[in-house]
Amino acid sequence: MTDAPAVNPAPGVDVAVVGGGQAGLATGYYLRRAGMSFVILDDQDAPGGAWRHTWSSLRLFSPAEYSSLPGRLMPRSPGGNPDADHVIRYLADYEERYSLPVERPVRVDHVVRAPEGFRLATDQGEWRARVVVNATGTWCQPFWPTMPGQRSFRGDQLHSASYRGPDRFENRAVLVVGGANSGAQIAADLAGVADVTWCLRGKPRYLPDDVDGRELFRVASQRVRAMAAGEPDPGGVADLGDIVAVPPVRAARDAGRLTPNPMFERFTGDGVAWPDGSTRRIDAVIWCTGFRPALRHLRELDLHEPDGSVGLDGTASTRIPGLHFVGYGDWTGPGSATLIGVGSTAKATVAGITECRHLTSTATLPSSTDVRT
């Protein structure tokens, strides 16, 4: 009679970070400094996070030197604001530079409570962790609005999350829907090759040309500090405008190729119609209508408040001890969905984890002349 084979226990760590994009890497940087055992579970095939799925002309809102994660400056980019490829190379270098323990591709299916903290079921096995930090962002959870007649429309429809460039739209009539940055940037990207109709509610609200991500982060941070101190609301980023005039947008706007149109009322079989009865034939629609936090892997947790919201104290869940959220925008910290803003949120999150879990620092980062906290 032979003994039954031993069952290997699920690997365990102090902290499991779900998501290996910019928020996950920034969190990993501070976890490494704190000396915690951790793993970063990323469902992508290679470094770069959501930046791997953008269009080639997409530009950061700020120059490279003001778009860095903690500890390592982003190299300067020719022509000013970096494009997606520049950011991807930077994130890959960052991950390697600090030897961050990223496991990929690993898709986390669900997270459940367990005596030791949490168990994470993935397509590559199970992990155990005392703390879970969600850094999944929003890119894989695009928001699609509905409009009357939409099902009868015979043209193509895609979300900005799936837009890769203008080539497939050459000489076609394209409707771009959305008045924020992605709508303006995609409309500008298409303006030279397609017949573009740009629809938005109201008029486009461009920020002054000299305003970039540095000012946006400053304003967002100022508002958070004022509200926390009980001071009058000084206004947030939305008060400045909705569209950062990055060079491609500014060029298209100044050349008269970005013409705003009011929102249409309904779809027809081959286009759209406005309340005044006018119609336009459309071959394809690109919805630039934003995203929602990608949190499906948390569906088995009692996460939501009665009103459907997710309550946070800083970045910590108010309902699930040990569960944190980093990188989802102002919900999790001013500017935390940006390269320039996520570092401070990640730092505060790791400090909170260390304090609550009594985990002590035993490790150090490689030496570098540009390490900043």
Image (cartoon, grey):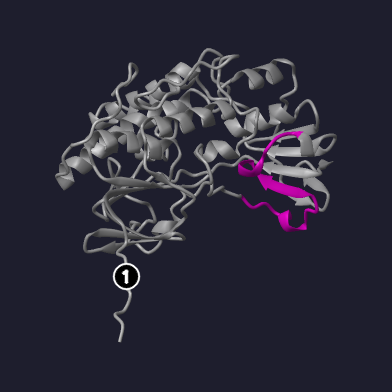
Residue 334 shows up from this direction: no
Quick check: 45 left or right of 287?
A: left
Q: Which residue is mark 1?
A: 7
Residue ID at (34%, 38%): 28
Q: Position of residue 290 (x, y in %)?
A: 55, 41
Q: Secondary structure at mark 1?
A: loop
Where does the magenta region start and end? 145-166
In the image, is residue 125 part of the stretch drawn in magenta? no
Q: Position of residue 357 (x, y in %)?
A: 17, 47
Which of the 4 image quadrants contains residue 345?
top left
Residue at the far front: name it: 1
In the image, is residue 147 part of the stretch drawn in magenta? yes
Which of the 4 image quadrants contains residue 233?
top left
Observer-nearest of 279 and 141: 141
Amino acid type indicated by mark 1: Val
Please state, as top left, top right, bottom left or bottom right, where the N terminus lies in the image. Answer: bottom left
Q: Position of residue 265 (x, y in %)?
A: 71, 46
